[in-house]
Amino acid sequence: MTCPNCRTPMTPYEAERLYGRGAIALDLCRSCLSAWFDDKELLQISPAAAIRLLGEFAKDDAGRRVPIDPALACPRCDHALVETHDRQRNTRFWYHRCPRGHGRFMTSYQFLRAKDFVRPLSEAEMTELRQHIRQINCANCGAAVDIERDAICGFCRTPVAIVDPEQVRKVLEQQRQAEQAEEMGAKPVRQAQGRPDPTLPLTLALERLRAERVWAVTPAASRQPAVLDLFFGNATDPIAGGLRVLSRLLGG
C-alpha cells in the first residue's frame, strides 16, 4: 500500500485486537509517521497494542511529520478522502476517511488524540513555556509554531500539546477493567486476582519516569520549569520526547 500523504510504501504492522480476538493488520508509514486503518480497525485495537504502536512512531529510524496533503486519496479505491471530526467520550479528534468505507488515514498525532494519549497545554503552562522557548514544531504536521504569537499551528490548526503519561496509564486501566467485566460477566472481581495486570509495566515505567526527570536540567544544573519536564529533553518537539521516553521505559 502507498501512503496517501507522502506517497511512499507503507509497512504492514500486526496489532492485537481487543479482548485477544486475533490480530489486526494495519499499514504504517514510517516516512511521515502516519497509519491507515481499514474499516473498524481503529476501534478494535487493544490498549496494549496502542501503546506498542506509540513505540513504532518513536523509533530512532522513524521519519518526521510533514504537512498533510490537501488532495489525499484512498489507497484502496483512489477516491478523495474526506476530513471527518469525531468524538470518543470527551475527546474530540479528526482524521480523513474514505467515503466508500474502506478506512481512515491518521497522522501519529491524530491517533494519539483519538486514544486520549495527548493533551493541550494549559494557559498557565503556555505562559511559562513562552518565558523559555520561542518556537516549537507542530505535533501534527511538523510546521514551526511561533508560540509567542499563538498556541496553535498556523497550518493545520493543531494546538500545542504533549504526551500525557498519566492519561496513558488511566486509559489502560479503564480498558483493563472493561475487559475484565466483559470476560467475567457477573463473576466477582476477586476471581480475577491471579490474572496479570497489563498496566503494571506502564505503572512501573511512570515511577522510573519521575525519577529520571533529572535529565531536564540546564548546563548549570539548575532545575528547569515543570512545563519543560513534559517535553522530556526535546524542547523543540512537544510529542517526540515523550514518545521516546515511554517507548524506552516500556522496553520498546
Image (tube, grey):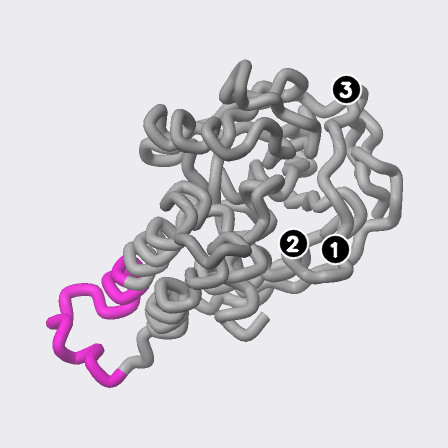
Q: Identity of the amino acid at label 1?
A: Ala
In the displayed structure, does residue 203 sit left or right of residue 113? left
- Residue 70, quarter of the rendered image: top right
Give, as a three-letter code, the residue at label 2.
Phe
Report the Cα–Cα distance between label 1 and label 3: 23 Å
Q: Is residue 75 visible?
A: yes
Q: Which residue position holds label 3?
A: 70
Rendered image quadrant of residue 182? bottom left
Q: Position of residue 42 (x, y in %)?
A: 54, 46
At 54% from the left and 23% from the top, the residue drawn is 147
Residue 89, position as x, y percentages in the image = 33, 35
Q: Is residue 169 above or below residue 1?
A: below
Residues marked 2 and 1 touching at CB (< 8 Å): yes
Callout 1 crowding tier (Cα within 10 Å): few <14, some 14–19, many ≥20: some
Q: Please tell me which residue is depicted at 81% across the width and 50% down the height of the picture.
A: 10
In the picture, the disc for residue 192 is: none
Q: Which residue is mark 2?
A: 57
| Residue span colored magenta | 177-194
Give the residue at mark 1: 62
Tag 3, which secondary structure? loop
Amino acid type at image mark 3: Pro
